[in-house]
Image: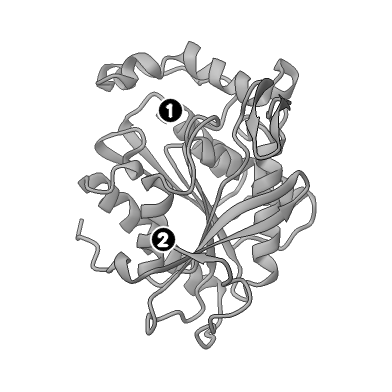
């Protein structure tokens, strides 16, 4: 796998807000360096992971991936969706007060709202991508957008995602390949409890927008899936890839040998380079099948806020 030859330090990043059904959603726009080829490129909306309850715009899985994609010629939008919480009494800018719990469907609603807003200003369409819990949110958002009759996505890509309410049975070979602390933290019991915390109720666990796996996947766009080799969640990713293929979706599925969960959160690892290279190559192919050539977009409109 060849190394990435793009200079992400030249990428311009701007923070802004998008209005959603539950209030403002912080987002960060990443723009390719001046002079970078942008012929017919779709805009990428990229959703970080973190078990539904942690993570943000500054974590490497969000920021470093977005910068690398932007350096390759794509406009990228990252999303600080609402994280799952329990009800608690805490301090905020309004003072001390009781804050209600955050559960599904709020994070999916945030992702859908951002995609819809970005679509309004993306003449070459939108590619939606997500990692881990962000892949789960993105898959649910795809089903919502399809059911709502929204503009079709150019494609979607998922990295080491969890798509089922309950972790599918792990093969003996997969169990034998698990190493490190996640061998104990990513057990079926703990992962299933994390899903329950996100969904809020056992009833919500069964909803197709919460966990797309095991549900009807009609009209799902062209999909890239990249799983980690030594990762319990690969049992969900592999099964979801089969479900998509059975539903008629075009699926490009990869397992990176020897890799561990969240490799996109480790930008100095070779697995980061390999994973992002797969995404870039696949996104360029998706562009070539979808978009017609256009002139590079001028910096205006959405490019407001505080530069990073």
Residue at screen point 50% across, 31% down: 239
Is residue 300 toward the left or the right of residue 218 in the image?
Answer: left
Residue 253 in view (yes/no): no
Position above or below: 144 against 124: above
Which badge, 1 or 2, comes first in the chain's sequence? 1
- Which element carries disc 1, helix, strand or loop? loop
Residue at screen point 26% across, 22% down: 177
Residue 191 in view (yes/no): yes
Position above or below: 149 against 134: below
Is residue 179 toward the left or the right of residue 299 in the image?
Answer: left
The picture places residue 218, in percent across and down from the top left corner, at 69, 46
Task: Tell me, for residue 25, which label it has, or none.
Answer: none
Is residue 158 toward the left or the right of residue 60 in the image?
Answer: right
Position above or below: 77 against 97: below
Task: Tell me, for residue 282, which label it has, or none.
Answer: 2
- Which element carries disc 2, helix, strand or loop? helix
Which residue occupies the foreground of this view, 75 or 293? Answer: 75
The picture places residue 278, in percent across and down from the top left corner, at 34, 55
What residue is pinned by disc 1? 233
Image quadrant assignment for residue 22? top right
């Amino acid at each position: 796998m060849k190394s990435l030859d793009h200079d992400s330090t030249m990428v311009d990043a701007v923070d802004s807000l998008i209005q959603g059904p539950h209030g403002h959603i912080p987002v960060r726009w990443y723009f390719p360096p001046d002079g970078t080829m942008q012929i017919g490129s779709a805009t990428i909306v990229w959703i970080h992971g973190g078990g539904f309850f942690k993570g943000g715009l500054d974590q490497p899985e969000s920021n470093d991936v977005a910068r690398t994609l932007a350096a390759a010629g794509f406009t990228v939008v990252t999303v600080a969706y609402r994280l799952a919480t329990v009800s608690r009494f805490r301090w905020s800018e309004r003072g001390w007060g009781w804050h209600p719990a955050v559960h599904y469907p709020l994070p999916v609603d945030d992702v859908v709202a951002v995609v819809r807003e970005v679509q309004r200003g993306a003449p070459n369409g939108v590619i939606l991508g997500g990692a881990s819990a962000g892949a789960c949110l993105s898959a649910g958002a795809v089903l919502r957008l399809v059911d709502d009759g929204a503009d079709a996505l150019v494609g979607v890509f998922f990295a080491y995602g969890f798509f089922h309410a309950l972790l599918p049975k792990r093969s003996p070979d997969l169990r034998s390949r698990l190493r490190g602390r996640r061998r104990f933290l990513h057990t079926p019991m703990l992962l299933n409890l994390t899903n329950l915390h996100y969904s809020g109720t056992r009833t919500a666990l069964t909803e197709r927008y919460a966990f797309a796996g095991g549900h009807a996947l009609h009209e799902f766009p062209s999909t890239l899936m990249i799983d980690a080799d030594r990762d319990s969640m690969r049992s969900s990713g592999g099964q979801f890839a089969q479900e998509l293929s059975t539903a008629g979706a075009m699926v490009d599925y990869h397992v990176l040998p020897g890799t561990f969960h969240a490799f996109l959160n480790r930008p100095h690892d070779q697995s980061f380079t390999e994973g992002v290279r797969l995404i870039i190559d696949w996104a360029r192919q998706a562009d070539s099948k979808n978009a017609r050539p256009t002139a590079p977009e001028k910096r205006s409109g959405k490019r407001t806020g505080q530069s990073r």
